[in-house]
Image (spheres, rainbow, N blue to C red):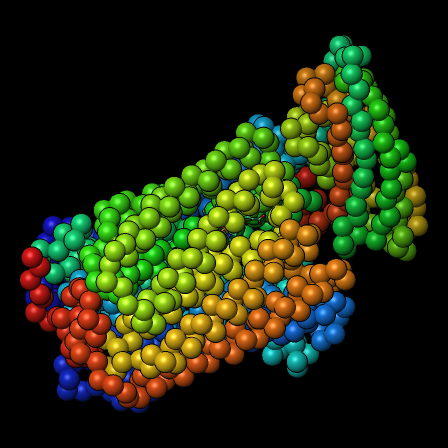
Amino acid sequence: MSAPAVSHRKLIGKLLAGVAAAFAFGFALVPLYDVLCAATGFNGKTEGGPGDKGLGGFSLGGIKGQAAAGNAPPSRIDRSRTVTVEFTGTVMPGLPWDMRPLTFSLELHPGEMQMVKYLVRNTSDRPVTGQAVPSVTPGQAAQHFDKIECFCFAQQTLAPGESREMPLTFIVKPEIDPDIRHVTLSYAFFSAVQDRTALNKQE
Amino acid sequence: MSHATTAAHDAPHGGHGAAHPSGLLRWLTTTNHKDIGTMYLLFSLLMFFVGGAMILAVRAELFQPGLQLMQPEFFNQLIGVHALVMIFAALMPAATGFANWQIPLMIGAPDMALPRINNLGFWLLPPAAMLLTLPFVLAIFGIGDGAVATGWTLYAPLSVQGGLGVDFAIFAIHILGISSILGSINVIVTIFNLRAPGMTMMKLPIFAWGWLITAFLLIATIPVLAGAVTMLLTDRHFGTHFFNAAGGGDPILFQHLFWFFGHPEVYILLLPLWGLMPHVLATFSRKPIYGYKAQVYAFIAIGLLSVVVWAHHFFTAGMPVPALLYFMYSTMAISLPLAVLFFCWIATMWRGAMSFETPMLFAQGFIVLFGIAGLTGLVLADVAADAQYHHSYFVVAHFHYALFAGGIMGVMTGVYYWLPKWTGHMIDERLGKLHFWLTIISFNLTFLPQFFLGLAGMPRRIPDYALQFTEFNAISTVGAFILGFSQLLFAWNIWQCMRGGEKADGRAWEGADGLEWELPSPPPHHSWETPPAIK
Ligand code: HEM
Ligand SMILES: [Cu+2]
């Protein structure tokens, strides 16, 4: 009558192992996704500097680190075409700041080094630290968008009421797909998270 | 699994006839598959009305442009909880109710393989449903700011920033997920181990096949959803940054994780119903099921394909062209096995001696309307078209043809078909037909205009709209109210059938074929204690 008890148990064991594997797979997607994005520039994640080793598998998406030696300006400038770069910025909830680009849009030749500035102001009456996170659209342009010097490489602290012009030096590499004539660089300024600071120190 | 085992109870279940607890205790402690099936189905019916009431409030707000009845925050809560309730507390439990009642009867097993797990699986549902809806009540008393307001997709960063309702939803999803996993394990073990002797896998009733694939999909995808909402929880409260760009995470990652579960979920909801359709069509066409093997292979193909197409839900979030193309073509490829199913359904009816009792009417309504869902899905799968239609009412109309016409009407088909078996009484045909015609007319009145609203650019999930959308929204709202109130006929018919009515034979429908029809109606509390012989 009760012959299948063992095989029940075996089957249940296998199925539970399947459940565990699926759960693990969900978490494995986190680093996998980041590796994929870093390799291909999906999602407009731009390359960071040499410090971009990630937080337990997370790419820092170009948040920190200085320009790597390999990021030196390429000698070739492609004067046969132009790319329009537009600049936008958003301040995320929780950060009492204003920001706007001083240059809204710029036409340049791929390979040319350019500098633009954002005007950022602390509207509160206390010192506040923020961190800007860049994103490039279309995503395919991201891997050819090199930031040489960027206020997003480090956290920025503004005194109460202080305004500051924050510079960005960049190159759109000549390897960029000729079909792309329009690139948008967008920054989201976040309130710097406490434990995030701790992580920075560790590195 | 070579040996189909004999009448096997590896767990005690309340003693044989002697000491059944009665009253509430009976239902709390029951391990009988028929009792548990009944509880699942009644719970599902109740939640169908709860979710329906929420969305009627939404439709009332959308009757006219401007804000009349509610604030946008409350509107957002209603649409999200409506969807979560309908998917997790109405459609999925209904399918599990079918599984409980029918799989043992149809494969000649005395009960489900794991009766106590079965009981637990059901009793996890009411607390989860309460967790989902409790924040509405708490808000009345000034605690929190209401239920989850992110829509059922819980996209980050909105869900990272959201209020108390998000935490409740996360816990509810965890509990519902555990319940589904337990149910799936039970179905798989039952089908693998408890088939009557001689019932090979290729003799398995097609309904059981549909459920088997569903069960595997649940096991593969629910844990990924559980992982995603766990990450959400730790992002909210424990300082991780899975989805927080400031900490190096990525909100788009959430969309990948969610839809890795979410797309297979739509097949999880429908496969049990695709499994039941051939039985109904064959019964009322008085012909055998056409293309049994083709349908089984189509189920398997759909199950496999469904886990590799998820990104078609966020083409517009930004992807490289090769990825867009891959997800477009793989999505369209799913329509091939789906078309096989459609042709098999039609061929089953072809030149049959058809009669049009209520279950047959619902089955045919299902085929036509679900066909529209599939065809409009192909439109959405087209990357270029989707750039315009994404997040518009076109999408809303598409998935209601899939989930109301394909899902809920499929459940109704099954309920009308098997109710005589379960209760021993025939349904009231006149009432059933009235219910069918009211449902199908008002369903189209509700959702057909939404295709055109979407094509004209009306976005979804917004409580207000531009003036040119007024007429179609008014029509849609009128349709929705007729649709909603017609469902009371369904509940009334079920109630009547449980109470009494014309006695049903063992083979309640003249053309019905299958093991369940060889038992009396209703079947005794313990059935197939000696397994039937399969030719
Ligand atoms: C050939 C079959 C199908 C195709 C090609 C298809 C394709 C699609 C696509 C591309 C979308 C995304 C649209 C957008 O958001 O822009 C979508 C949305 C959706 N589909 Fe389908 N679909 C099909 C069948 C189904 C079925 C069978 C179901 C349900 C049982 C379903 C349920 C849904 C749901 C719920 C959504 C919207 C989810 C949300 O954003 O909340 N679809 N479908
Ligand atoms: Cu999908």
Residue at point 51% right, 37% down? B328
- In the foreground, B197 or B280: B280
Whole-percent x and y of residue B100? Answer: 28, 68
User: Which of the 4 quarters of the picture holds residue A189?
Assistant: top right
Residue sitting nearer the eye, B90 or B206 = B206
Can the viewer see residue B142? yes
Q: Is residue B4 above or below residue B17?
A: above
Residue A190 spot, x, y in % from top left:
75, 47
Residue at the extreme top: A75
Residue B311 in the figure: left or right of residue B358: right
- Label tally: 0
**Residue drawn at x 90%, y 36% as measured from the top left:** A102
Residue B152 position by quadrant: bottom right
Q: Is residue A203 visible?
A: no
The residue drawn where x is 12% and y is 61% is B196
The x and y percentages for residue B514 are 17, 64
Q: Position of residue B238 (x, y in %)?
A: 59, 56
| B308 vs A48: above or below | below
Relative horizontal placement of residue B47, taking residue B5 as reference (left or right): right
Q: Quadrant of the C terminus of chain B?
A: bottom left
Name which residue lies at 31% across and 72% down: B357
